Amino acid sequence: MSTELLSQITASLVDGDPDLTIDLTKQAIQGGIEPMTIIERGLVPGMNIVGDKFSTGEYFLPHLIISANGMQQAMDLLEPELRARSQQMKVSGKVVIGTVQGDIHEIGKSLVATMLSASGFQVYDLGVDVPAEDFIAKVKETGAQLVGLSALLTTTMIVQKEIIEALSIAGLRDQIKIMVGGAPVTRSWAAEIGADGFAEDAIQAVQLATQLMGA
Ligand code: B12
């Protein structure tokens, strides 16, 4: 039953039917399916299929936008559920997170921000298309110990490197840990650009953040 519902959620995103995505997500929540399961086994596979169809030329930008709207609205429903289930940990820290300049993908970054915040971190989400100077200013203002840089485009991965360099030039590198993520980002890229860690998804991002805080 739950597998079928999750497949229907995936299909509704692929078909670009946000109303159905929302309806099915509500049904899944009411049916007691864990929010992270709905995200990982229902929504994310749908977005991946849409992305693949876009890259092969079967889908165009409007398809991407419609499906992203469906996912975003489903995430709005799931966010309070994720928060309700989270265990507030005693270990916490301040995290500045954003999608790097030139990149407007926000769904994954926001999911990471939600999970961090639900796990006890104080999160300053700078949004998307964020230049280095905004990260620098926010770290100075808040005294954050962690910075998260999201990039979804192969062309904006390099901006993660530039922001790490800018944080070093600003004299902040020694007082912060930097984690990077986003679909094209890999562990070896993270090492190459001098980040302190990489996480593949929001759950791993919380584990990484906790580890980087020395908890
Ligand atoms: C939705 C989407 C969009 C939406 C975004 C809407 C929004 N509000 O976010 C819209 C329609 C705006 C869009 C636009 C574009 N997109 Co787009 N998009 C996607 C799509 C289909 C899904 C992304 C997504 O939300 N995934 C779901 C989330 C949950 O996963 P995630 O983002 O990977 O995040 C997880 C992890 O990566 C990790 N993570 C993410 N951030 C961080 C940060 C840290 C610190 C850590 C630790 C972890 C972490 O945790 C997250 C949660 O589990 C992808 C395809 C794909 N499979 O990724 C293409 C994709 C990323 N887009 C692509 C392209 C080309 C574009 C455009 C250039 C298209 C165009 N011609 O204009 C523009 C770019 C505009 C810009 N300047 O940014 C390409 C990129 C190709 C490449 N090699 O660079 C992709 C891969 C599609 C494809 N297969 O061709 N896109």
Image (cartoon, rainbow, N blue to C red):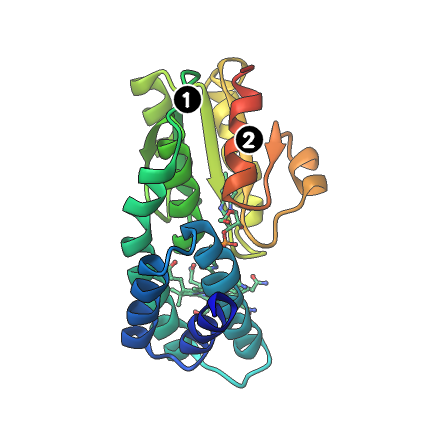
Q: Specify the farthest residue to the bottom.
A: 58
Q: Residue at x 46, y 77 (%)?
A: 11
Mark 2 falls on what kind of element?
helix
* Rendered position, 63 above or below 34: below
Q: Residue at x 64, y 29 (%)?
A: 194
Q: Which part of the image, by quadrant, shows the C terminus?
A: top right
Asked if residue 184 lies left or right of residue 144, the reply is right
Q: Residues within 10 Å of mark 1 (few under 14, many from 20)?
A: few
* Rendered position, 101 above or below 174: below
| Residue 152 locus on image (x, y percent) | 51, 54
Mark 2 and mark 1: Cα distance apart in space: 12 Å
Q: Which residue is mark 1?
A: 89
Tag 1: amino acid: Met
Q: Residue at x 44, y 71 (%)?
A: 5
From where the camera sits, is residue 18 visible?
A: yes
The image's mark for residue 30 is none
In primary-sequence order, the first of circles 2 and 1 is 1
* Rendered position, 1 above or below 102: below
| Residue 182 locus on image (x, y percent) | 54, 49
Q: Which residue is mark 2?
A: 207
